[in-house]
Amino acid sequence: MMQSEKVKKALDAVEDACGHCAVCSPDCPIAIAKRALTGLLYDLKQMEGAPAENSCSC
């Protein structure tokens, strides 16, 4: 399983744990985890789509 798939599963679990409060605070641990995992997922997707670091492009 690719790292991005594992992070997506973790993000889904955090979303399930969210109580969907009427007012979400930036200090909420769920909101912090969602922001961190979303950023990590974005970075992993970018890295997976990029060509291999040691590959020759000539």
Image (spheres, rainbow, N blue to C red):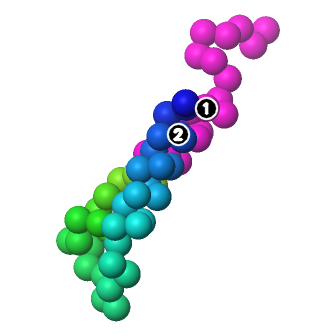
Task: Point out which mark residue 4 bears.
Answer: 2
Q: Is residue 6 magenta?
A: no
Q: Position of residue 3 (x, y in %)?
A: 49, 34
- Reply above or below: 47 against 23: above
Query: At x 40% / y 58%, what residue is drawn?
Result: 13
Q: Is residue 45 magenta?
A: yes
- How far apart, in angstroms, are the residues tagged by discs 1 and 2? 8 Å
Q: Is residue 42 visible?
A: yes
The magenta segment: 39-58
Among all residues in the image, which is located at the extreme bottom?
22
Describe residue 4's horizontal placement relative to residue 16 as left or right: right
Task: Look at the numbered disc 1 and give the secondary structure of its residue.
Answer: helix
Amino acid marked by disc 1: Glu
Residues at marks 1 and 2 touching, judged by CB atoms closer than 8 Å: yes
Describe residue 54's horizontal placement relative to residue 33 as left or right: right
Quarter of the image for residue 16 reads bottom left
Query: At x 67% / y 10%, what residue is drawn?
Result: 55
Label 1 or label 2, whichever comes before in sequence order: 2
| Numbered circles on residues, count | 2
> On the image, numbered disc 1 is attached to which residue?
48
Within 10 Å of disc 1 (Cα), the crowding (few <14, some 14-19, many 20+) is: few
Q: Position of residue 21 (x, y in %)?
A: 32, 85
Quarter of the image for residue 51 reads top right
Q: Can you say which quadrant of the picture contains the C terminus?
A: top right
Amino acid marked by disc 2: Ser
Task: Look at the numbered disc 2 and give the secondary structure of its residue.
Answer: helix
Within 10 Å of disc 2 (Cα), the crowding (few <14, some 14-19, many 20+) is: some
Task: Point out which mark residue 1 bears.
Answer: none
